Image (cartoon, rainbow, N blue to C red):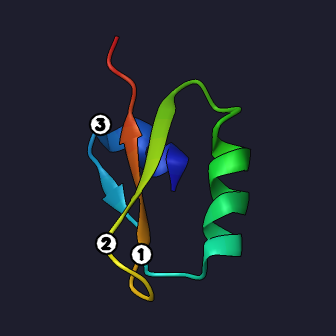
Amino acid sequence: MADKTVKTRRVVHLEPMPSFERKTIHAILSEDKRVETHSEGREPYRYIVIKPVKG
């Protein structure tokens, strides 16, 4: 999904998931300097947003 975000230059919203899964994805994608991530929504419907880094 990070590749899709970079290729399309659009924000991608993932499906809602448990916090341990979100933390894993945030940790992995924090190493990818092409994208930024954050979580939105309320439990149990929190989801990750992946957006391309400008520049």
Disc 3 from disc 2: Cα separation: 23 Å
Residue at the spot of label 1:
46
Q: Residue 19, how many percent across, how many down?
A: 62, 74
- The residue furthest bottom is 44
Closer-to-camera residue (21/42): 42
Type of the residue with mark 2? Gly
- Among the two numbered marks 3 and 1 on one chain, the one whose residue lies closer to the N terminus: 3
Q: Quadrant of the C terminus?
A: top left
Place residue 33 in its image quadrant: top right
Mark seen at residue 41: 2
Three-letter code for the amino acid on which mark 3 is drawn:
Arg
Question: Badge 1: few (under 14), some or many (20 or more) residues near its Cα, within 10 Å?
Answer: some
Q: Element under label 1?
A: loop
Picture coordinates of residue 31, whole percent (x, y): 71, 32
Residue at 41% from the left image edge and 75% from the top image edge: 46
Q: Residue pushed farthest top?
A: 55
1 and 2 marks in contact (CB < 8 Å): yes
Give the residue at x 39% y 25%. 53
Q: Residues within 10 Å of mark 2 (few under 14, many from 20)?
A: few
Q: Residue furthest left?
A: 10
The residue that disc 3 covers is 9
Along the line of sight, the residue nearer the viewer: 29 or 38: 38
Q: Nearer the viewer, residue 8 or 45?
A: 45
Q: In the image, is residue 4 above or below residue 21?
A: above
In the rendered structure, the answer to whether residue 28 lies left or right of residue 11 reads right
Q: Secondary structure at mark 3?
A: loop
Q: Position of residue 37 (x, y in %)?
A: 47, 45
Q: Nearer the viewer, residue 55 or 17?
A: 17
